[in-house]
Amino acid sequence: MSQTALILIDWQQGFDDLDYWGNRNNPDAERNGEKLLTHWRKAGQPVIHVKHDSTEPQSRLHPDHQGNAIKQALAPIEGEPVYGKNVNSAFIGTSLEADLRAQGISRLVLCGITTDHCVNTSTRMAGNLGFEVTIASDACATFDRSLPDGRVVPAELVHDVALSSLNGEFAAVKTVEQIIGSASQG
C-alpha cells in the first residue's frame, strides 16, 4: 500500500502575533492539525514539516526571530524532516519533491498557515507536479487581507475562496474528520 505523507506548513510561533498579522480565522486550526498529526504518527505514515525562513530581518518568521520556531504541539519529533523555505512554495529551493519521489510517495495531505499563501502555493505546485493532494480545510488558517483601495477582505472569506479555488482542480478539500475516516477505511 502506498504511503500518504502529511505535510505541515508554517505552523510557526510568529503567526501568533496578531498585532503584526491582524485578524485571523479558524482559532481551532492548530487543535485540528494536532489531531491529524497524532493520527498520522499512530498510523506510521510519513510526517513532513515545512517552515518559512523569511529573508526580511523584521519578519516574525526570520530565522533570527523567536517566531521562526515551530509551535510546540505541532513540532517535529526525531526522524521527521523539516524543510526550510524562503518563498511560498514548499517545493521551491528544497529537495521536497525529490525526497517524496525517492520514497515512492505520490499522495499528500497538507495543512497549515496561511491558507491563501504557502498552503495554496504548495498545493498548486504539488498538483502540477502530479501528486494527489488533499487539504485539511479545518487545519488551515489565514488573516484579513487588504486591497489596494483600502477595502479589507475578512480572513474567513479569504480562507473559503482559497480553498474553493483549489478544490477539484489541484486538490480535494476535506475536514480532518473526513481525512481520518478515509485513512481508517483505506
Image: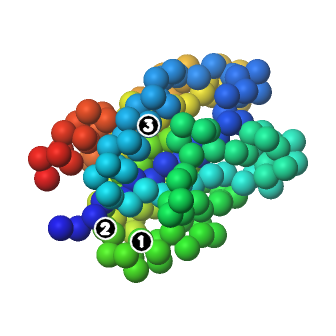
Residue 121: percent from left, percent from top: 51, 52
Q: Secondary structure at mark 3?
A: helix
Q: Secondary structure at mark 2?
A: loop
Q: Position of residue 57 (x, y in %)?
A: 87, 48
- Using the image as rendered, state which of residue 1 and residue 154 is in the foreground: 1
Q: Counting residues from the N terminus, which is met first, the one under dot 1 or under dot 3?
A: 3
Which residue matches tag 1? 100
Picture quarter with the N terminus: bottom left
Against 102, residue 48 (above or below) is: above
**Horizontal side of residue 105 vs 48, given as left or right:** left
Image position of 28 with respect to 109: above or below: above
Q: Is residue 169 visible?
A: no
Which disc, if any, is residue 106? 2
State how far apart marks 1 and 3 are (Cα).
Answer: 21 Å
Q: Residue at x 40, y 80 (%)?
A: 102
Q: What amino acid type should be assigned to the residue bearing mark 3?
A: Gly
Residue 106, picture quadrant: bottom left
